[in-house]
Image (cartoon, coloured by chain):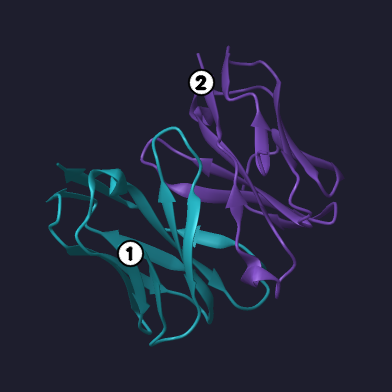
Amino acid sequence: EDQVTQSPEALRLQEGESSSLNCSYTVSGLRGLFWYRQDPGKGPEFLFTLYSAGEEKEKERLKATLTKKESFLHITAPKPEDSATYLCAVQAAGPSGSRLTFGEGTQLTVNP
Amino acid sequence: DTAVSQTPKYLVTQMGNDKSIKCEQNLGHDTMYWYKQDSKKFLKIMFSYNNKELIINETVPNRFSPKSPDKAHLNLHINSLELGDSAVYFCASSPPFGLTKNIQYFGAGTRLSVL
């Protein structure tokens, strides 16, 4: 069974204090690893997809990396508007189709 | 222009009632999903339809029945609501695999409260 574990559960940073969120996964053949951002009262918003170990993607202050066992979401010089819950999900190759298996998320708070 | 829209946004009802949640997407996608997010924010897939055909059916009580009249709509009907059904339900859609690599786009959610 596919599993995704995210750590930490919650992270509080000062504005400008860089850090990383972790996503560890086990999957029977990775089709893709997805990062989403979720604001309170809203649906998950797509950030990145990574497909193979060594791949990196960047968007503004966010950078996602992937190894064979985990992914990191690096946040450089965060701002208060980066406060949100960050969700990691995996999609397995094979008959499971397009199902996404999500982790429980990391709730990030950036204080001004 | 809302890409994936769900109605209603909030639903408060009594135990034992039957209710429906509607979902529509205007992205031209051919696959749609229902997810349930519990109080711990854990998102879990319930169903998936591709071109009106059921392709994923997780271990969900028979009281939950999805219906897809066309590939732009996926509705969720729930019979005999129970307290444990209280959660936020999200609809999502994705293009055929190979186009934007099967990224799923989510609606804003329907918060269901069963009293």
Q: In the figure, residue B38 lies in which quadrant?
A: top left
Q: What is the residue that sits farthest to the front in this orientation?
A: A60
Q: Chain of mark 1?
A: A
Q: Give the structural element (helix, strand or loop) at label 1.
A: strand
Q: Is residue A14 left or right of A73 when viewed as pictured?
A: left
Q: Chain of mark 2?
A: B
Q: Is residue A96 visible?
A: no
Give, as a three-letter code, the residue at label 2. Answer: Ser
Q: Is residue B17 visible?
A: yes
Residue A38 image point, x, y percent: 42, 46
Seen at 23% across and 49% down, the residue is A79
Residue holding disc 1: A62
Task: Out of A16 and A65, give the one closest to the viewer.
Answer: A16
Camera-near label (1 vs 2) is 1
Q: In the figure, residue B78 lies in which quadrant?
A: top right
Q: Colour of chain A?
A: cyan
Seen at 64% across and 39% down, the residue is B61
Give, as a three-letter code, the residue at label 1. Answer: Leu
Residue B62 image point, x, y percent: 70, 38
Check disc 1: other Cα within 10 Å, few if <14, some if 14-19, many if 20+: some
- Check the image and report above or below for A94 versus B61: below
Seen at 12% across and 58% down, the residue is A17
Residue holding disc 2: B113
Seen at 71% across and 51% down, the residue is B32
**The chain coloured purple in the image:** B
Task: Out of B99 and A70, give the one closest to the viewer.
Answer: B99
